[in-house]
């Protein structure tokens, strides 16, 4: 029987970007919406909510595949099982990175219930 480490639904992939502003524009031309845009990181999402995070040179984040959990308790249980610390992020999410499959890195991420509401109210 397969031993389940943790589960989640794929939320985004994070890829390197040599030109953050230019790449954001490029994804907008493909119908993506900009969810977050900082000097050193951006997140764009397609019409169905799948995200692509853009990591410019020097980013502190590694390229990765992110899986989303629905509760903080799930994130905490998985982090404890994996022996990884949870980090809160400036966009309001919390996550940890861990070993993925085939040398990839997996991020397990939790979006709080009020995620994006402050931004939407601006
Ligand atoms: Fe991520």
Image: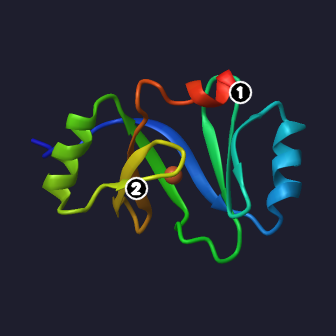
Residue 64 locus on image (x, y percent)? 50, 58
List the residue tagged with mark 1: 122
Residue for point 28% across, 30% down:
71
Query: How far apart in space, not on screen, are marks 2 and 1 (Cα)?
Result: 32 Å
Instruction: Describe residue 56's horizontal placement relative to residue 8 as left or right.
Output: right
On screen, residue 63 above or below 110: below
On screen, residue 38 above or below 91: below
Residue 20 quadrant: bottom right
- Neighbours of disc 2 within 10 Å: few (<14), some (14-19), many (20+): many
Callout 2 touching callout 1 (CB < 8 Å): no
Mark 1 lies within 8 Å of ligand 1 (Cβ measured)? no
List the residue tagged with mark 2: 106
Residue for point 40% across, 37% down:
68
Residue 6 locus on image (x, y percent)? 23, 43
Element type at mark 2 = strand
The total number of labels drawn is 2
Q: Nearer the viewer, mark 2 or mark 1?
A: 1
Q: Earlier in the sequence, mark 2 or mark 1?
A: 2
On screen, residue 62 above or below 66: below
Which residue of the protein is positioned furthest toward the left in this rendering? 1
Residue 109 quadrant: top left
């Amino acid at each position: 029987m397969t031993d389940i480490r943790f589960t989640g639904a794929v939320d985004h992939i994070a890829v390197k970007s040599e030109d953050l502003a230019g790449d954001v524009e490029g994804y907008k031309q493909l119908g993506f919406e900009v969810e977050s845009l900082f000097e050193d990181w951006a997140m764009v999402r397609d019409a169905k909510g799948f995200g692509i995070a853009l990591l410019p040179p020097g980013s502190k984040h590694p390229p990765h595949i992110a899986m989303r959990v629905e509760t903080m308790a799930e994130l905490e249980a998985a982090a404890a099982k994996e022996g990884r610390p949870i980090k809160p992020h400036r966009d309001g999410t919390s996550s940890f990175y861990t070993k993925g499959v085939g040398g990839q890195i997996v991020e397990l991420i939790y979006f709080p219930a009020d995620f994006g509401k402050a931004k939407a109210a601006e």
